[in-house]
Amino acid sequence: MKSFLASVGLFAVCVSFTARAADLPVKAPPALPPPYNWSGFYLGANLGGAWTSGSLPISGNNLYGGITEFIGGVQAGYNFQAGHLLLGVEGDFDGVTFGHPVLPTPTLGSVRPNWIGTVAGRVGLVEDRWLVYGKFGGGWVQSNASLNFPGVTWQGSNTSSGWLGGVGIECGFKSHWTIKLEYDYIGLGHWTSATVPAIPLNRDLQMVKFGANYKFESGLPDTVAPARTVHSAVRSEGEDLAKKSQNPIADMVSVPFQSNTNFNAGPYNRTQEVLNIQPVIPLRINADWNVISRTIMPVISQPSPLFNNNTNGIGDITQQFFFTPAHPGSLIWGVGPVFTVPSATDPILGTGKVLFGPTAVALVTPGHWVIGVLVNNQWSVGGNPLRPPVNEFLAQPFVNYNMAHGWYLTSSPVITADWLAAPGQQWTVPIGGGLGRIFKLGDQPVSANIAGYYNVVRPTGAPNWQLRAQLSLLFPER
């Protein structure tokens, strides 16, 4: 009997404890943020390079056999997202700029595009902030052509249509902003000159574009939009921000404007000016990995190798991607691809080739120091078949020492090698350094520095001195 009563009592205690436990508050697991929303209208801008492998079948033609151009314009579109599937439509319009070089002999024939327009459907796969897509549709290219050889002198213009195919990758790095990288191919029909004999103008067009879009509908609900980190004025001007600004793969948006003035270039000892616009945008892959997008668009004033004058315009655009750990140890590193598109507005300002290769960066930040090196090598893989091949190496070691009140000492020489040049003409090796400071313009954190470099090793005709001045807009709040 006692055993039965004890069992009943134990059962009652268990029931009572279970009932009370059911009433206790249970800590719910943290809610995952909703995925990025790609649906809605967007408007944006793009720039890049275009090239063609078309030809003019004229014996002895000394220019046309593939040309390259700088392109830039706008795009607009609409996306509809259903889970991981995206369907959309997009149209864009780009102007084309290409200057012919001054030649000692007459040009027998050339074709010059003036503008490019496309309308296409987009089909893509979405994974949170990342979109990989294909484009299919049509394109229109307006071109001028000229022929000038014995018995034939002719000029004409034509707007040709063709089919468009392309692929791209896009990332939503802000609630309303995305960036993208895209390759497009337009297959155009033949255009025949109104001459006797008739000359068929055979063309196709390939493009690589870098673009940014503004989404009218936010990619994230307002309640889960990334919180902006509050930085005090002291911290924004402090050593932590200085080290981030000196780290090529820091998790911070920055827009450097770097002026490189090179003295005593070419046969007339003229001055070459290269202004590099270099936006750096970190993109999150997951909790463990980031990819850092680093674009270099040069605006160049280039001395002519034949005449005592300068050619001004935009050079070939280089794009780098560094895959880097989100939580690195004492050694910070990143590796990835680098490529250059033939976007020069004049042949003298670029190689006319599509370049591709690997790139890597590694650095450490002991105490007040930031010490590291960035390297890459690029080979020509396409572009104008009349231009010579390219095989170029670049190494940029950098050493920075940070001091009080935002001041720092800096040295970051750019060492290059042209592996296809003649012996003794391959390397450019500068030495030097300078001084910089982190400060604020109103509420905007800025890094500015100035440095001088002397080329102790250089090819014949290369500049011997360089003055480098850089102003970087820093955006530590993400």
Image (cartoon, helix red, strand yellow):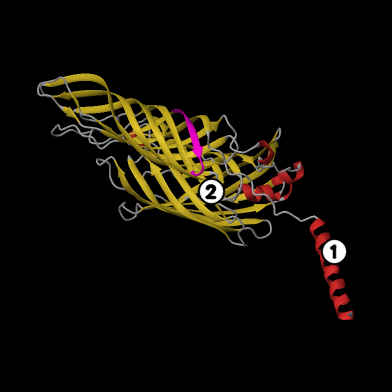
Asked if residue 228 lies in the magenta stretch, the reply is no
Dot 2 crowding, Cα within 10 Å, few <14, some 14–19, many 20+: many
Give the residue type at disc 2.
Ile
From the viewer's perspective, tell me whether residue 304 is left or right of residue 242.
left
- Front residue of 80 and 134: 80
The quadrant the N terminus occupies is bottom right
Q: Position of residue 61 (x, y in %)?
A: 18, 33
- Front residue of 215 and 327: 215
Dot 2 falls on a residue whose secondary structure is strand
From the viewer's perspective, tell me whether residue 51 is left or right of residue 411.
left
Q: Earlier in the sequence, mark 1 or mark 2?
A: 1
Asked if residue 79 lies in the magenta stretch, the reply is yes
Residue position marked by numbered label 1 in the rendering: 16
- Front residue of 151 and 127: 127
Q: Position of residue 243 (x, y in %)?
A: 64, 51
Residue position marked by numbered label 2 in the rendering: 292
Q: How many marks?
A: 2
Tell me: residue 411, above or below residue 17: above
Residue drawn at x 31%, y 27% is: 113
The magenta-colored residue range is 74-84
Which tag is nearer the camera, tag 1 or tag 2? 1
Give the residue type at disc 1.
Ser
